[in-house]
Amino acid sequence: MIPFWAIRKTILKLCRMKIGKNSFINLKSYFMAPSRLKIGDYTHINRGCTLDARGFITIGNNVSISHGVSIFTGSHDKDSHTFREIDHPIIIEDYVWIGANATILQNITIGKGAIVCAGSVVNRDVEPYTIVGGVPAKKKGQRSSNLDYHCIWDCPFT
């Protein structure tokens, strides 16, 4: 566990992860296939997240991913006698906020400005500026489309 973001970021880039300017990943996050993960600018991934990018994950700009979020692009064919792996991409557009301990399943697009409430399980696409919550996640409301912020984290020791 390397407590300095600048060093961790360099190592992740050596693993071919694409990380935009002023984006930040807290400690204790786990990555599968980092070369298939693209993170935009001013995006913050909090502690203890799991990102399975075997099927590709694209995360936009100004995205906040809260503590303990799990994002899974990979699964298995339950009917395959060889337990065949099945991978599908996940796209998280700009200004999305994913609440703590939410789970995002494969082959999902979360639209611009959407909010996924804490503890939710997303198994269907989320429309832009929609708030979803629950298991499975269902529409709970709408978010303002007037968004203009950056997710900035400037503590180098987390």
Image (cartoon, grey):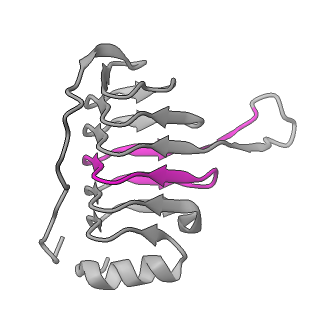
Q: Determine whether, in the image, residue 86 is placed left or right of residue 117.
A: right
Image quadrant where one finds the C terminus: bottom left
Q: Residue 105: in sight, yes or no?
A: no
Q: Position of residue 2 (x, y in %)?
A: 29, 80
User: Vertical placement of 13 versus 145: above or below?
Assistant: below
**Quadrant into which the N terminus falls:** bottom left
Residue 7: x and y in percent read 32, 85
x and y, in percent, of residue 17 in the image: 50, 70
The residue sitting at 35% across, 53% down in the picture is 49
Q: Is residue 69 above or below residue 125?
A: below
Residue 122 visible at all: yes
Does residue 57 belong to the magenta stretch?
yes
Q: Residue at x 45, y 36 (%)?
A: 104
Residue furthest left in the image: 155
Q: Quadrant for residue 103, please give it.
A: top left
Rendered position, 26 above or below 59:
below
At 16% from the left and 77% from the top, the residue drawn is 156
The percent position of residue 142, horizontal first and vertical second, equals 25, 19
Residue in the picture at 41% in, 33% down: 111
Q: How many marks?
A: 0
Magenta range: 49-77
- Rendered image quadrant of residue 19: bottom left
